[in-house]
Amino acid sequence: LLCWNAAYFSHGRTLRAASLTSAICAVVLSVLLADFVLSALQLRNVVAPAEEAAFRIGSAKAGLKYAAFILAFLLNGIFSWRAAAAVQRSTRPHRT
């Protein structure tokens, strides 16, 4: 929503800040996803055999949610950066 409003009102600096924030969030979530995967691999030996299927399904769902948010933040960062460049090109004075 912030990126859409900044693009609509031609706020290039706000778009750049939002894109950098999105990229940082994608990197942080990537690190957290790696930690989650390693933790899930360590805990799979502790889970009771009767609950192993539920653990695997739950871990897979959580991992996919992490991946979806990483992708969303990454795409938001890329497209906001490109929109900021377009806003700056359109607000630049034209030579005649």
Image (cartoon, grey):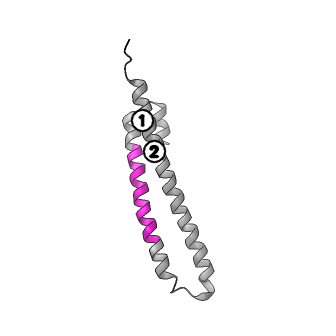
Q: CA distance from mark 2 to mark 1?
A: 10 Å
What residue span does the magenta drawing correspond to?
A: 18-36
> Magenta: predominant secondary structure element?
helix
Q: Position of residue 9 (x, y in %)?
A: 46, 30
Query: Is-magenta flag for residue 31?
Result: yes
Q: Secondary structure at mark 2?
A: helix
Q: How many marks?
A: 2
Residue under label 2, please give it.
Answer: 78
Residue at point 60%, 88% (across, down): 49
Q: Disc number at residue 84?
A: 1
Q: Is residue 7 above or below residue 72?
A: above
The x and y percentages for residue 80 are: 45, 41
- 36 or 4: which is nearer to us? 36
- The mark nearer the N terminus, 2 or 1, is 2
* Residue 39 as seen in the image, left or right of residue 57: left
The residue sitting at 41% across, 64% down in the picture is 31
Classify 10 Å Cα crowding around label 1: few (below 14), some (14-19), many (20 and above). Answer: many
